[in-house]
């Protein structure tokens, strides 16, 4: 969904009041993902999961941000096994041993939230289960790096990318996981996709400064094989070229003067970030 091109970045910094409004969208996404995750089971179709998610979003008074985005026909992306991201839900049913990544976005009063979870279907290969844990840990390492960077006043965007990659390499096995490079995270606010693009790999100390008011979606994608991906003829589904299994997790987080606030995590990130979470995350209980 993101084209890389040379041009001046347009970064929308948010005020604390605007970040509070984005928290509302983030909580809708968290709740929708919770009920959708709970509905995952062998025999369930991905279209049925989409219905569950859309109902949760609309019942909360929000709007699914994916539906109609460049004519995307559903409220979630449901990427199974070798599918990496952007898969359109459909009649295919989940089978025991599958893994599904569910990506969800919602809009509240014009402000977006965006998050994804990877969920096992029945008895999942322990190697894939471990890869999902590593992706999750790498995402939190990236958010922690951002929180440290905003506190020090010297952080740069690629410090997050470097932290993600480093955590994947630290925790991952040999042979290494593939880190998907063709897709990544992004700024988010009054649109789902804003500047800057956030890579899941690379050297630290580059790119825009990590400043209060920056709100980002961070989304590592890992594969059990090679990182190369291709887009299917439907114009959406991204798959691994070698057919290896992929996982994808995502959170939307805001940077404040005193740390990070994970807007799509119910606890604001307190459990995983500890003292790096912003005090503002305590304002919503
Ligand atoms: Mg997403
Ligand atoms: Mg995203």
Image (cartoon, rainbow, N blue to C red):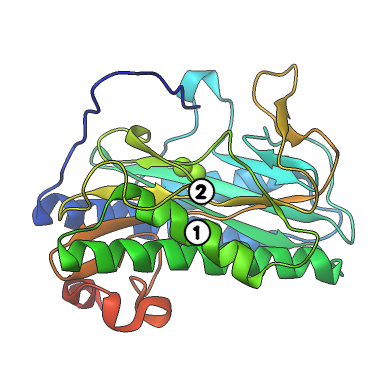
Confirm if mark 1 falls within 8 A of ligand 2.
no
x and y percentages locating residue 225 in the rendered image: 80, 48
Residue at point 72% right, 53% down?
100
x and y percentages locating residue 172 in the rendered image: 69, 67
x and y percentages locating residue 200 in the rendered image: 51, 48
Kindly identify which residue carries mark 1.
Answer: 164
Q: Are marks 1 and 2 in contact (CB under 8 Å)?
A: yes
In the image: residue 244, left or right of residue 256: right
In the image: residue 228, left or right of residue 220: right
- Let me know if residue 102 appears in the view: yes
Kindly identify which residue carries mark 2.
Answer: 200
Residue at point 37% right, 33% down?
193
Mark 1 crowdedness (10 Å alpha carbons): few <14, some 14-19, many ≥20: many
Q: Nearer the viewer, residue 107 or 116?
A: 116
Which of the 4 image quarters holds residue 87? top right
Secondary element under disc 2, as helix, strand or loop, is loop
CA gap, disc 1 and disc 2: 6 Å
Residue at point 50% right, 27% down?
1
Residue at point 20% right, 62% down?
150
């Amino acid at each position: 969904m993101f084209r890389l091109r040379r041009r001046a970045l347009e970064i929308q910094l948010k005020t604390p009041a605007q970040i509070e409004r984005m928290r509302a969208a983030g909580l809708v996404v968290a709740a929708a993902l919770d009920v959708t995750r709970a509905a995952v089971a062998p025999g369930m179709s991905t279209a049925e999961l989409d219905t569950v998610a859309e109902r949760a979003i609309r019942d909360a008074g929000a709007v699914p941000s994916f539906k109609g985005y460049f004519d995307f026909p559903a409220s979630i992306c449901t990427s199974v096994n070798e599918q990496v991201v952007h898969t359109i839900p459909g009649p295919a049913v989940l089978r025991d041993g599958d893994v599904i990544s569910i990506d969800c976005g919602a809009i509240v009063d014009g402000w977006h939230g965006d998050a994804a979870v990877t969920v096992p279907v029945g008895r999942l290969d322990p190697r894939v289960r471990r890869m999902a844990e590593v992706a999750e840990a790498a995402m939190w390492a990236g958010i922690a790096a951002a929180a440290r960077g905003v506190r020090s006043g010297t952080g740069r965007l690629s410090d997050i990318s470097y932290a993600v990659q480093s955590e994947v390499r630290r925790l991952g096995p040999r042979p290494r996981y593939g880190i998907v490079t063709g897709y990544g995270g992004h700024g988010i606010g009054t649109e789902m996709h804003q500047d800057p693009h956030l890579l899941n790999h690379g050297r630290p100390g580059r790119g825009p400064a990590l400043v209060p008011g920056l709100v980002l979606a961070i989304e590592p994608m890992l594969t059990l094989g090679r990182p190369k991906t291709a887009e299917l003829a439907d114009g959406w589904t991204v798959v691994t070229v070698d057919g290896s299994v992929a996982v994808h997790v995502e959170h939307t987080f805001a940077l404040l003067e005193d740390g990070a606030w994970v807007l799509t995590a119910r606890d604001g990130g307190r459990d995983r970030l500890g003292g790096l979470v912003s005090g503002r995350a305590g304002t919503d209980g």
